[in-house]
Image (cartoon, rainbow, N blue to C red):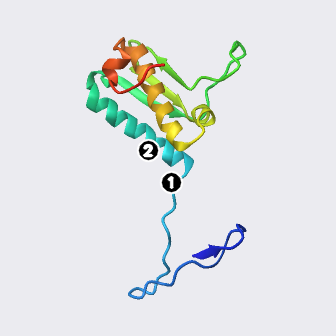
Amino acid sequence: MRRDRHERGLRGPLAAPNPLTAQPVTPRQPPGRTAFFDDVVAASLRLIRRNCPQALAGVEIGVVDVPEITAAWTDPEPPVAAAVEATVTTRAKVVLYRRPLEHRSASRADLRVLVHRALVEQLSALTTISVREIDPELDED
């Protein structure tokens, strides 16, 4: 690995090779945007499963990059999530839209809060379980 001089990219050696293996030392890279988003959704689902497992019973959770907007769409901003009722042949679904959620958050911490809030609100609308019952710590505005 090479060091970054004058913020022009990594150029010189960053660390000496490992003396035992003679292999170069590679620093850990933070997860990419998609991997981070998937980790955030998984963490939110673990929290919901711990607080209110019946909210996830019979519900599929999915992530899509962007919503499909039809010509009849009138809102100025795209939705961040959608809940789809169960039918005779399909299960109930909650779909989170990654790009609109990322666009509305200023930082990764904001993204965590926004994803969790969107997931809890969609589950509440789908299952008629109150938001407080799904997540007692969630602050309501």
Badges 1 and 2: C-beta atoms under 8 Å apart?
yes
Establish if 140 lies above or below 27. Answer: above
Relative to residue 94, is residue 80 drawn left or right?
Answer: right
Question: Mark 2: few, some, or many residues within 10 Å (few <14, many ≥20)?
Answer: some
Regarding mark 2 in the picture, which secondary structure is present there?
helix
The quadrant holding residue 13 is bottom right
Marks 1 and 2, the one that precedes in the sequence: 1
Q: Name the residue type under label 2.
A: Asp
Q: Which residue carries the number 2 mark?
A: 39
**Residue under pointer 1:** 31
Secondary structure at numbered mark 1: loop
Q: Position of residue 141 (x, y in %)?
A: 48, 19
Residue at point 46%, 42% (across, down): 38
Residue at the image position 50 percent from the left and 31 percent from the top: 114
For the residues labelled 1 and 2, the Cα–Cα distance comes to 9 Å
Of residues 107 and 25, the one nearer the viewer is 107
Mark 1 burial class by Cα count in 10 Å: few <14, some 14-19, many 20+: few
Quarter location, residue 123: top left
Quarter of the image with the N terminus is bottom right
Residue 12 seen by the camera: yes
